[in-house]
Amino acid sequence: MLEESKAPEGDIIVSKFGGSSVANAGQIKKVGNIVQNDPGRKVVVVSAPGKDSSDSEKITDHLINIATEGKHFLQQRKEISASESLKAVTGKFSGIIRDLGIDGEDILKGLKADLKKSLPANMKIDFYASRGEHYNSIVIARYLESAGIHAKTLLPEEMGFHVTEEFGNAKVIPISYKNIKKKILSEINSGLVVIPGFYGITEKGDVAIFSRGGSDLTGVKLHTRLMPLYMKTGQIQTGYTRWIREKFPGQR
């Protein structure tokens, strides 16, 4: 039977928190408690905020609906306009920021600006869809800092997480692994890093997303590629998945 325990000194845990685990301020505070109680959790991969009792649709679906000017939900026979989706997305992030008690005016400003960006259709869907993970990682890192946990956001574009130009179904390019190792190792000595799942950057600098559920893929890629680096000093623990799912039954 797999049991969860604190990582011994020198070990590292790559923790993936899905949408339901970061759905609101209360859940994010639980994430803060988890990483604070185990210094081995140096790499945290997060999804976009998931649905809670106040939400009728997922944030990612709202973002795609904005990108497609309402067609995404219309195809599902749901009468939710792009403007209603925009209100839902900004309202979700505003509520989380308010309830966490952090300064997030710049985050909301950046989110709103991104959701006005003009791009070709396929690139637009990927870019807009990625904003849930992108901005949630920033919110969570800022909250952790406010709670006395040294943390920073590490974005795919900052660590050279390169993917193919297969928009909507991107694949990781091998050079990414070397880039990721180098960048993460240079950052985790001073604290933990919060990484948005679900997307990477093409060699031309465009955002491209993995298939739905891609935040899990990000976590797996980081876990498997970091593990060889720590074979001499310890090992990456994998029990966190079962433990988090027990703590958060709605984890996807």
Image (cartoon, grey):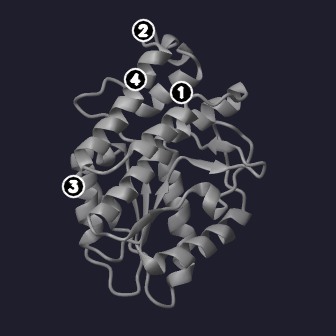
- Quarter holding the C terminus is top left
Q: Which mark is residue 79?
A: 2
Give whichever of discs 3 and 4 has the lower sequence position. 4
Residue 3 at least partly seen:
no
Distance of label 2 from label 3 (alpha carbons): 35 Å
Distance of label 1 from label 2 (alpha carbons): 14 Å
Asked whether disc 4 touches disc 2, contact meaning CB atoms under 8 Å apart, the reply is no
**Picture coordinates of residue 46 (x, y %)?**
42, 52
Of all residues, the one furthest to the right in this rendering is 204
Label 1: state its secondary structure: helix
Distance of label 3 from label 4 (alpha carbons): 31 Å
Q: Amino acid at mark 1?
A: Ile
- Quarter holding the N terminus is bottom left
Front label number (2 vs 3): 2
**Picture coordinates of residue 51 (x, y %)?**
31, 34
* Pick the front one: 165 or 249: 165
Q: Amino acid at mark 2?
A: Glu
Q: Is residue 111 above or below residue 26?
A: above
Asked whether disc 1 touches disc 3, contact meaning CB atoms under 8 Å apart, the reply is no
Distance of label 1 from label 4 (alpha carbons): 14 Å
Q: Is residue 120 left or right of residue 169?
A: right
Identify the residue at horizontal 60%, vertical 56% (top origin). Answer: 156
Q: Mark 4 = which residue?
A: 87
Q: Mark 1 = which residue?
A: 64
Front label number (4 vs 2): 4
Q: Mark 3 = which residue?
A: 247
Neighbour tally class for label 3: few under 14, some 14-19, many 20 plus, Cα within 10 Å: few
Q: Amino acid at mark 3?
A: Lys
Label 2: state its secondary structure: loop
